[in-house]
Structures are given as C-alpha cells and as structure tokens.
Amino acid sequence: MIEVNQLGKSFGDLVVFRDIQLHIQSREIVVLVGPSGSGKSTLLRCLNGLEEPDAGSIRVGEAAWDASMDAARKKQAIRNIRTLTGMVFQSFNLFPHMTALENVMMAPTLVKKMSRAQAAEIGESLLAKVGLSQKKNEYPSRLSGGQQQRVAIARALAMQPQVMLFDEPTSALDPELTGEVLAVMKQLAAEGMTMIVVTHEMKFAREAANRVIFMSDGKIQEESTPEQFFVQPKTERARKFLRQIE
Ligand code: ADP
Ligand code: MG
C-alpha cells in the first residue's frame, strides 16, 4: 500500500532524514516512535503531501511521487497522494466556525464536489461510527478534546482515504480522554484500515500494531514486532528511548 525508497528531507542545513526505506502492506498497523525532533512528523507530512521531500520516491496506492519528476508531474503526484491519505494531528485542527457535521462534510463537498445531501449522509454515518451522532450540530468549542479528535478522525475518513496517518493523536488530551480516541483507532484497525501512528501510547502499540518502527538520528534504526521492540529492543538507542518514556 505504501512504498518509500531512499527518501530524504532537509530544511536548509538541517538534514531531518535520508535514505528512508519503508514498505507497508494493506491493512497493516505501523506505530512510529522516536525521540522528539527525530523527524516523525516530517515523515508523515511527506507521506501526506504536506511537505515535499528532496530525494527518493513515495508510492501510496496508485499515486507515485519521485524526486526526478518535473515540477508539474510532482505537483499532480502530490495532489493524488493527498486524496489517498487521511491525516489526524495532535491539535485536532477543526474549523471553529463550523459544526461537527459541517467539519466532516467540508472536504467531500469542496474537493469531491459531492452534493450537500450526500455529504451530510456520509457525515452522519461517520459521526455515528465515532460515537458522536448526538453532537453533530455542536461547534468544536462545545466539545471535549476527545470528542473534537473523534470529529477530526471522522473528517479525515470522509475523503475515503486508503491510508490513515495519525501524528500523536492523543498527546494534547487529558489522560481520561485518550481512551475514547484510541478505541476509535482500534476499531478502524480492526476494520482493515492501513495506518501509521506516531504515538507514545505503548499500550496501543502493544495491542494494535503489527510493527513498530523506531526512528532516530535521521534514520530508521529498528523495525520489530511490538513484542520484540518492547521486550528486547535491538539497539542501545532504542533501549535508552524506552527507559525515557516509561
Ligand atoms: P518529531 O515529530 O519526531 O518530533 P519533526 O519531524 O517535527 O520531529 O522535526 C524534525 C526536525 O526538523 C526538528 O529538528 C525540527 O525542528 C525540524 N523542522 C520540522 N519542520 C520544520 C520546518 N518547517 N522548517 C525548519 N525545520 C523544521
Ligand atoms: Mg512530531
């Protein structure tokens, strides 16, 4: 479903990562961990077309981007990749002047030119899926953080992505609200969604991930099953990281 080869990204003199290789199967749940500043968000943003890499290639489903393409083809490739990937951020990023339902309906009506009636139907079923049917007419300011994040997940799903990318989706939430968001993510995983999740929720990683990828110093240092990674990490760098987040 996702194939990344020799991917590189720098900001000016700062090399965030280089030579990233990543192959993810359909229906796979990959948890991406690593120290702060190791490039996890930048990698997700490259996979979603929010950031343009400087080297290598990305394929998501049928959409492919390659550093050697000309500017026009790259632009089209990024547009294609963006429609196939849904992204959920730490900070929810809902539109404050729109209700929960309007937030979910926005991209389908604007980008896919769907009729309002059809978008509303899809929006209501997605809000039901994340357990928020009763809140469809509320504005974000009247929702808890956990509810806002569930709306954000429904909004990302409204574009029918083939892959969902989550960047620390529970980090901004009070501890008692993380469970409801993780439960929605687990349900999505069980339904067969392909997912990459940056998270410090090690319980989620243990229970839901097929694979844990540990990034640091601009590289993928380690790829293991959750059992291996948490019980017997291969590198000293990963052991140190695990001690710090415990
Ligand atoms: P992580 O998500 O693992 O904490 P990030 O991907 O956010 O790491 O950041 C990786 C590095 O790239 C950091 O040193 C960060 O300061 C830098 N960085 C991220 N985005 C930008 C940007 N738009 N411009 C310049 N530097 C950036
Ligand atoms: Mg980050």
Image (spheres, helix red, strand yellow):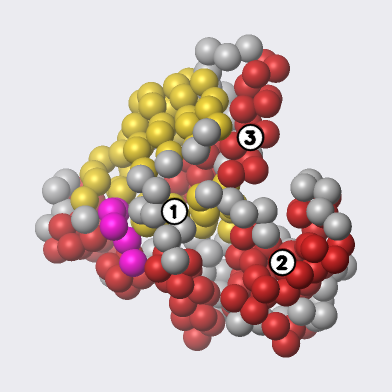
Asked whether mark 3 lies closer than 8 Å to ligand 1, one says no
N-terminal label among 2 and 3: 3
Vertical order, 28 against 169 (above or below): above
Q: Is residue 79 above or below residue 71?
A: below
Name the disc covering residue 115, or none: none
- The residue identified by callout 2 is 122
Residue beneath disc 3? 80
Binning the other alpha carbons within 10 Å of mark 3 as few (below 14), some (14 to 19) or many (20 upward) gives some
**Where does residue 195 sit, x and y in percent of width and height?**
44, 55
Magenta residue check for 30: no
Question: How many angstroms separate mark 3 from mark 1 (CA)?
Answer: 17 Å
Q: Is residue 176 above or below residue 115?
A: below
In the image shown, does 246 or 4 lie closer to the viewer? Answer: 4
Dot 3 falls on a residue whose secondary structure is: helix
Q: Secondary structure at mark 1?
A: strand
Which amino acid lies under the numbered mark 3 shown in the image of this protein? Asn
| C-alpha separation, residue under disc 2 versus residue under disc 1 | 20 Å
Mark 2 lies on a secondary structure that is helix
Q: Amino acid at mark 2?
A: Ile
* Residue found 80% across the figure and 81% down from its top: 138
Measuring from the top left, give residue 24's x and y in whole percent: 36, 43
Q: Amino acid at mark 1?
A: Thr
Quadrant where the C terminus lies?
A: bottom left
Residue at x 43% of width, y 27% of height:
7
Residue in view at x 53 percent, y 64 percent: 169
Residue bounds of the magenta highlight: 208-212
Observer-side mark, 2 or 1, equals 2
Label 1, on which residue? 194
Can residue 101 be seen here?
A: yes
